[in-house]
Amino acid sequence: MKITSKGQVTIPQAVREQAGLYPLSEVEFEVRANGDVVIRPVQSAVSGVREAFARVRGSANATQFKGMGTDEFMAFLRG
């Protein structure tokens, strides 16, 4: 694996999945005394929008949403 002229490297899919690294994940690097470099995901606070979507994920067919228009649903998501 080579580092590009911009300092970029592609992390293999299997490694990303095992480490829990997904598109738009934030990561941090640690350089250890022996020169090893460790990359790990940053545990960031969940944004309000992500939290709202998490509350309703998989529930679009729930009875509370039947007959609800787009504006009403968006108001529900925004709290």
Image (cartoon, rainbow, N blue to C red):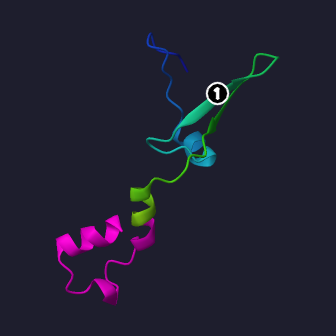
Question: Quick check: is 7 in the magenta stretch?
Answer: no
Q: Where is residue 3 in the image (x, y as percent from the top left)?
A: 52, 16
Residue most extreme to the right = 34
Residue in view at x 62 percent, y 47 percent:
18
Residue in view at x 44 percent, y 71 percent:
55
- Camera-side residue: 9 or 31? 31
- Camera-side residue: 70 or 38? 70
**Few, some or many residues within 10 Å of mark 1 (<14, 14–19, 20+):** few
Q: Position of residue 12 (x, y in %)?
A: 54, 35
Label 1: element kind: strand
Which residue position is annotated with label 1? 29
Question: Quick check: is 70 in the magenta stretch?
Answer: yes
The C terminus is located in which quarter? Answer: bottom left
- Camera-side residue: 69 or 1? 69
Residue in view at x 31 percent, y 72 percent:
76
Q: Position of residue 41 (x, y in %)?
A: 60, 41
Residue most extreme to the top = 5
Q: Where is residue 36 in the image (x, y as percent from the top left)?
A: 75, 21
Range of residues picked out in magenta: 54-79
Residue most extreme to the front = 79
- Camera-side residue: 13 or 27? 27
